[in-house]
Image (cartoon, rainbow, N blue to C red):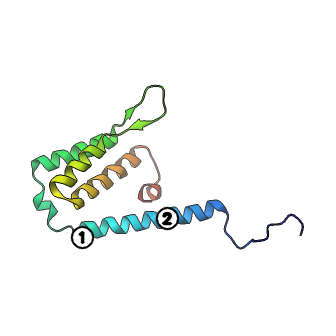
């Protein structure tokens, strides 16, 4: 057939992208679970200061700063995430950031599947 694509076995571009995003999302979720499981006794290491940092991380993600004249937003959560990373390690920082991101997605009424992926 003239004008037909020579390779019709490839999935359309959107399907391939969705598969890639799903794979990366599930890999990230599995890595987060592994970090939480192998992170040791990080809950015992969390003192009042670290819990305040985790709270500010969540608040920083939920209340982004809107830039005047732009449609962009800036969050302050990364500073608190880094402070948690330095003071108590990877597991608390990653888990707090994941919780904050999921809460921010829920606030924006994104679908749960989109929030996980």
Q: Quadrant of residue 28?
A: bottom left
| Position of the N terminus by quadrant | bottom right
Question: How far apart, in angstroms, are the residues tagged by discs 2 and 1?
Answer: 22 Å
The dot on residue 11 is: none
56 relative to 14, above or below: above
Picture coordinates of residue 40 (x, y %)?
Answer: 16, 68
Residue displayed at 42% across by 30% down: 67
Residue displayed at 60% across by 65% down: 16
96 relative to 77, above or below: below
Query: Which class describes the residues within 10 Å of circle 1: few (<14), some (14-19), or many (20+)?
Result: few
Picture coordinates of residue 17 (x, y %)?
Answer: 57, 61
Point out the residue furthest to the top here. 69
Point out the residue furthest to the bottom here. 9
Name the element at disc 1: helix
N-terminal of the two: label 2 or label 1? 2
81 displayed left or right of 16: left
| Position of the C terminus by quadrant | bottom left
Residue displayed at 23% across by 61% down: 91
Q: Are marks 2 and 1 in contact (CB under 8 Å)?
A: no
Picture coordinates of residue 101 (x, y %)?
Answer: 35, 50
Label count reads: 2
Picture coordinates of residue 94 (x, y %)?
Answer: 28, 57
Q: Quadrant of residue 25?
A: bottom left
Query: Which class describes the residues within 10 Å of circle 2: few (<14), some (14-19), or many (20+)?
Result: some
**Mark 1, residue position:** 37
Residue displayed at 61% across by 63% down: 15
Name the element at disc 2: helix
**Mark 2, residue position:** 22
């Amino acid at each position: 057939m003239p004008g037909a694509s020579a390779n019709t076995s490839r999935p359309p571009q959107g399907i391939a992208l969705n598969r890639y995003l799903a794979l990366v999302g599930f890999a990230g979720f599995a890595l987060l679970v592994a970090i939480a499981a192998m992170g040791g006794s990080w809950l015992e290491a969390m003192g009042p200061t670290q819990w305040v940092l985790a709270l500010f991380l969540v608040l920083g993600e939920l209340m982004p700063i809107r830039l005047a004249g732009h449609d962009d937003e800036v969050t302050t959560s990364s500073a608190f995430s880094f402070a948690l990373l330095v003071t108590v390690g990877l597991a608390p920082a990653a888990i707090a950031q994941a919780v904050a991101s999921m809460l921010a997605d829920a606030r924006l009424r994104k679908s749960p599947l989109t929030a996980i992926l």
